[in-house]
Amino acid sequence: MIEQCGPSFRFDRPFMAWINNGEPKNMGQVVDEWLRLSSV
């Protein structure tokens, strides 16, 4: 994950809640969401 998201990557509570919200996700979707959230 750090390779794709950069050294500032962290699993915080809101991000973990999004990952575990019941919708199936692949690793690419998780990376895309982290990049979207970290650019805000």
Image (tube, rainbow, N blue to C red):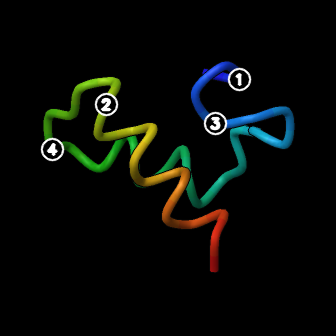
Q: From the image, tell me which residue sits under label 4.
A: 23
Q: Which mark is residue 5?
A: 3
> Nearer the N terminus, badge 3 or badge 4?
3
Rounded to the nearest whole Å, what is the CA distance between mark 1 and mark 2? 13 Å
Mark positioned earlier in the residue sequence (4 or 2): 4
Q: Of helix, strand and loop, which one carries label 2?
A: helix
**Quadrant in which the C terminus appears:** bottom right
| Mark sitting earlier along the chain (1/4) | 1
Query: Position of 22 compared to 31: left or right?
Result: left
Task: Tell me which label, 3 or 2, sits earlier in the chain.
Answer: 3
Q: Residues within 10 Å of mark 2 (few under 14, many from 20)?
A: few
Element class at badge 1: helix
Which residue sits at x=29%, y=50%? 21
Q: Residues within 10 Å of mark 3 (few under 14, many from 20)?
A: some
Q: Secondary structure at mark 3?
A: helix
| Residue that label 1 marks | 2
Say few, some or many: other residues with alpha carbon within 10 Å of mark 4 (under 14 / 14 to 19 / 20 or more). Answer: few
Question: Looking at the picture, which amino acid does disc 4 mark?
Answer: Glu
